[in-house]
Structures are given as C-alpha cells and as structure tokens.
Image (cartoon, rainbow, N blue to C red):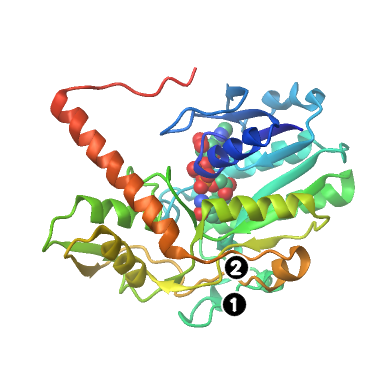
C-alpha cells in the first residue's frame, strides 16, 4: 500500500513507520522534525508544517491508500496541564486536523486514521482512583480536564462530520498512555513512564525519586508494540466510531515508580512532591474493542517497562560518555 504518516517524526509515528515499511508498504511522512533518536525508515520524509493548508494541495493527487494522522502539539502532564501551552495546543492541533479532514474530503478510497486520546473523557467520571469510567459512550456530556482533551474531542467531531457530509473514510482511536523505547524522556514534554525511568536511571543507591502528587492517582500504560497491533486491527475493520486503545490494567503512579526501581536493581525510595497530577483515576475500558475487533492487549507492564528503562539508561550513559570524550553531533536524517 501507499501510506502517508503525518507526525512520523514523533514517538508513535516513528514506530508505526518501522512496522509499515517492514510489511513492505511505501511510506511518505511529514513532520516538523525528523525522529529524535533514530533515522526514519520512511521512503520519503518531508519536513513541513501541517498547519499550513498549502502543504496539502499536492498530497490529494498522491493516491494514498491510508493516511495516519498522528501529528499534534502534545506532551506529558507537565506540558498539557500547566495551563501555559493551552492556546498553542488548541490552535496548532486543531489547524492540523481541520486541514487533514478538508484535504481528503470526497476521497472515500483513502482510509484515514485519527489519533484521539483518553484525555477526552469527562473529569466527573475520573474522580475515583479505583473506579474511573472511560467507556466510549460516556464521553458526553463533555468535561475533559485539559484543553488538549477538548481539542481531541473537537477534532473527533471534525472527522466524524467530514465522514457524514463528505465521505471521509475514518477510524478513530483514543490512545491511553502509550510507552516504549524512543519515548521522549527529558525537555519538558516527557510522560510519566519515561520521566520516571530517567529519574531512576540517574539516581544512586540511597537516593529519593520524586513523584508528582501523592502517587495514589491511577493510570494504565500500553506498550508501543501492542498499540500498533490495535491500530492495525482497527484499520482492517469497518468500525468507524471512536474506540479506546489502551491497557485495562490500572496501577498507581507510585506502583509504576516502584516497578521501575525494582527493574533498576537500585535501593531507592519514593518522595511524593507537589506537581501536576491530572484526574484521580484513568483506565482504558476495553469492552468495546474486544467486542468489535476481538482485540485485547497482553498487559505485561513489566516487559515494556524493562525495555523502556534500559533504553533510557543506555541513552543517559551514552550522553555521559560523549560528554567525557567531547564528542558532539546529531543524527543525519537526510
Ligand atoms: P509526539 O509528540 O511524539 O509526536 C507528534 C508529532 O507531531 C511530533 O513529531 C511533532 O513534531 C509533530 N507535529 C506537531 N505539530 C506539527 C505541525 N504543525 N506540522 C507537522 N508536524 C507536527 O506524540 P506521540 O506520542 O507520537 O503521539 C502521536 C499522536 O497520538 C498524537 O496525536 C497524540 O496526541 C496522540 N496520543 C498519544 C498518546 C501517547 O501516550 N503517546 C496518548 C494519547 C494520544
């Protein structure tokens, strides 16, 4: 197939491209940046700003079989919950999604995947750490806890309206905390698993690891390979309504940190500090995806965390060695 991956410089897009290329598809990607840690395997990689509608003018004649829309202005809790980036998040991501929906209207032969988020779910269903309610049908009345979530909900509606009125052939997944090697682990946009791995990787025996909030807030985490299988199942199906792709095995953030500490083999303790926490509890409700697509993740959190931890550790050790030997330089993606 001929496939366009928007946001192929990002974490999920980069892994998705690896898989699509390995399966012998021809892949074109567009992003503001090349992948951060490894060269992209895309056959063609365009550096471009998807907020610009002119960028799409030539794309409609490319006769893609599939388009994956993964580009977004996003980050972890430190980025999306601080309140300091709300205008950019709403403006940038909505512009991208409006452009994508508009560009492919009237082309039902192109399957378009849109990456929505667990952040669309209302705050009032996520106040209890032990029993959050993230069933797809409970997304309305809407009350997301962040403008990032509001934008995703708005853009779901954009894609669904374009499907209704202009024949867009859509699939929509609501991802729940996808993690794995090549997650950003520093710089302010990192998410909890990679941030915790970084803190543990740089800690020494006897140190404390700082965790935001009281650590009893709950989340679920899905390993990237499982996520890619879920995406594939969805794209192969005829199911066009938004559906969760996530793990339904909740852990507290302190449990997550404890797992990483155990993997590291270090003697560390957890110190809970004030920081952005988000909703009290969040978990993927997988009843719909099991019923419609017969998909469920294997839920082995430790397996994925080991991969992520040792990847982060090796990066940090490499950086330290380069610092010592004075080697500098970046990736050449050209
Ligand atoms: P990411 O931030 O790693 O990747 C997003 C990519 O979009 C980045 O490479 C960025 O440069 C690109 N981008 C942003 N603005 C752009 C623009 N104007 N023009 C071109 N490219 C632009 O994020 P990710 O983790 O790979 O997530 C992919 C998608 O899945 C996003 O839409 C995200 O909101 C959604 N999602 C991810 C998670 C998760 O846990 N990773 C959870 C829920 C939803």
Q: Residue 133 got which mark?
A: 1
In x, y percent, where is residue 229? 64, 53
Q: Is residue 72 left or right of residue 140?
A: left
Q: Is there CB contact under 8 Å for labels 2 and 1?
A: yes
Q: Quadrant of the N terminus?
A: top right
Residue 81 visible, this angle: no
Label 2's element? loop
In x, y percent, where is residue 4? 69, 32
Task: Name the residue at 41% across, 34% down.
Answer: 37
Q: CA distance from mark 2 to mark 1?
A: 8 Å
The residue under label 2 is: 121
Please, is residue 4 above or below residue 291 in the view?
A: above
Q: How many marks do you count on the picture?
A: 2
In x, y percent, where is residue 267? 16, 65
Which one is nearer the viewer's eye here, 20 or 326? 20
Task: Name the residue at 59% across, 43% down.
Answer: 93
User: Between tags 2 and 1, which lies in front?
Assistant: 1
In x, y percent, where is residue 241? 77, 60
Q: Is residue 229 left or right of residue 300?
A: right
Cβ at disc 1 under 8 Å from ligand 1: no
Please, is residue 200 above or below residue 32 in the view?
A: below
Q: Residue furthest left?
A: 206
Task: Name the residue at 75% across, 41% down.
Answer: 101
């Amino acid at each position: 197939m001929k496939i366009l991956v928007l946001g192929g410089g990002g974490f999920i897009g980069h892994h998705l491209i690896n898989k699509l290329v390995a399966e012998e598809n021809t892949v074109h990607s567009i992003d503001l940046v090349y992948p951060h840690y490894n060269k992209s395997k895309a056959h063609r990689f365009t550096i471009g700003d998807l907020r610009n509608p002119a960028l799409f003018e030539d794309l409609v004649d490319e006769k893609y079989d599939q388009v994956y829309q993964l580009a977004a202005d996003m980050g972890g809790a430190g980025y999306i919950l601080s309140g300091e980036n709300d205008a950019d998040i709403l403006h940038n991501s909505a512009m991208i999604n409006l452009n994508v929906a508009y560009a492919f209207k009237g082309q039902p032969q192109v399957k378009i995947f849109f990456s929505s988020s667990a952040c669309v779910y209302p705050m009032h269903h996520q106040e209890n750490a032990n029993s959050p309610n993230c069933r797809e049908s409970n997304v309305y009345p809407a009350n997301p806890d962040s403008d990032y979530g509001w934008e995703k909900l708005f853009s779901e509606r954009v894609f669904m309206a374009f499907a209704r009125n202009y024949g867009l052939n859509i699939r929509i997944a609501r991802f729940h905390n996808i993690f794995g090697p090549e997650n950003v682990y520093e710089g302010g946009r990192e998410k909890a698993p990679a941030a915790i791995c970084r803190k543990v990787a740089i800690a020494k025996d006897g140190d404390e690891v700082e965790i935001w909030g009281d650590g009893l807030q709950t989340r679920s985490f899905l390993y990237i390979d499982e996520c890619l299988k879920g995406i594939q199942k969805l794209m192969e199906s005829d199911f066009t309504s938004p559906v969760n792709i996530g793990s339904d095995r909740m852990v507290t953030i302190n449990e997550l940190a404890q797992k990483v500490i155990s993997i590291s083999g270090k003697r560390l303790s957890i110190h809970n500090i004030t920081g952005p926490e988000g909703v009290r509890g969040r978990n993927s409700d997988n009843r719909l995806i099991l019923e419609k697509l017969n998909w469920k993740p294997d839920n082995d959190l430790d397996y994925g965390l080991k991969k992520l931890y040792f990847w982060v550790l090796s990066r940090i050790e490499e950086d330290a060695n380069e610092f010592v030997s004075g080697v500098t330089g970046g990736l050449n993606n050209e």
